[in-house]
Image (spheres, grey):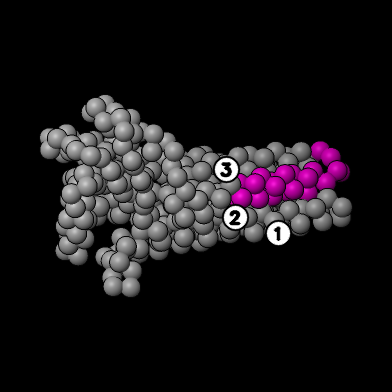
Amino acid sequence: MSKMKNKKLKLISTIVGSVVNAALAVLKLYVGLISNSISILADGINNFCDTFGFIGASIGIAVSDKKPTDKFPYGFGKTEHVVSLLISVLILVIGGLFCYQSLERVFMPLPITFNWLHFGLIAATIPVKIGLAVFLWWVDKKSDSPIVKIEKLDCILDASITATTLLGFGISKYTSISVDGIFGVAIAVIIVVVGVKLAAKSFGNLIDKKDEATYDSLCELFKTYGYADVDVKIFGFGSEKYAVAVIGEIDEDKDLAIKSEAKEKLNLTLYIDTGNNLLTEQITEQNNKNDKGENYGEKE
């Protein structure tokens, strides 16, 4: 898939995500306010934050493939990771706020107005979120975007949260115990835990934490071509990943075959340094292509 088509697909997915989450947020906030359910309100606010998350993701994707400039010679690819980190922090903050509010509801319970119509409306949002998660999973397989990965996981989490909220809302009809507050706390804790994990992962991607799986796969690729002793370094700029392999000598046909396979199977732009300044020439050539809007190893 070409870089332009890749970007278009990711933008479509984030726009669809924004619209879907905005609609779900309005519905849940309405039901939460009418029924006085803190857990449904928390779920609605979570969807509202997801809406801003998808909007931020759209901005990150739109900016990430801008051409390098004198001030930013490595491009803007890591914008995706920055936005992913901001989304994660937003999830974490919202989870903390609603954990506090739900605890208040546990100790100072308020009456819940149960209605089967409202129950059905909230239940209907679960398959919608699952459908969005499936759509984002398909986009992720095509684009390999860190933002889409996070949003996909968030959709799965949201569907689980809504199911838990629905359970608490139904039980509240038959008991005077503050089930709504208890479920609200449980949902908030889940949101906080996931927020911490996503923030840690996004931060790791931002500072180029070593990707052990990709590193091992690349080393194994060299071994299949008869090169066991290879010094490999992997780095990336957003969804664009690069690798530099230092090797004493390599056959020209194998050089091209390894690079092609690394691009196709691992989504890596590979440079092979044989110690004769070829690496410098390759990188210079690639920078010139970038200035002209071309992409190394791009496929339609």
Label 2 CA crowd tier, 10 Å (few <14, some 14–19, many 20+): many
| Residue at the bottom extreme, as displayed | 71
Quadrant holding the C terminus: top left
For disc 3, the marked residue is 157
Residue 126 in the magenta stretch? The answer is no
Q: How many marks?
A: 3
| Left or right: where 196 falls relative to 179 | left
Label 1 CA crowd tier, 10 Å (few <14, some 14–19, many 20+): few
Under circle 3, the secondary element is helix
Q: Give the dominant element type of the magenta stretch: helix, strand or loop.
A: helix
Residue 32 position (above or below residue 243): below
| Left or right: where 250 falls relative to 68 | left
For disc 1, the marked residue is 97
Q: Which mark is residue 91?
A: 2
Residue 3 in picture, x, y percent from top left = 25, 52
| Earlier residue among tags 1 and 2 | 2
Say which of 4 and 30 sits in front.
Answer: 4
Q: Which residues are magenta?
A: 174-196
Say which of 234 and 63 sits in front.
Answer: 234
Under circle 1, the secondary element is helix
Residue 195 in the magenta stretch? The answer is yes
Residue at image position (58%, 47%) is 197
The CA span between labels 1 and 2 is: 10 Å
Residue at image position (38%, 38%) is 215
Residue at image position (70%, 38%) is 167
Say which of 270 and 171 sits in front.
Answer: 270
Q: Give the residue type that dot 1 points to.
A: Leu
Residue 183 in picture, x, y percent from top left = 74, 44
Frontmost of labels 3 and 2 is 2
Residue 73 image-quadrant placement: bottom left
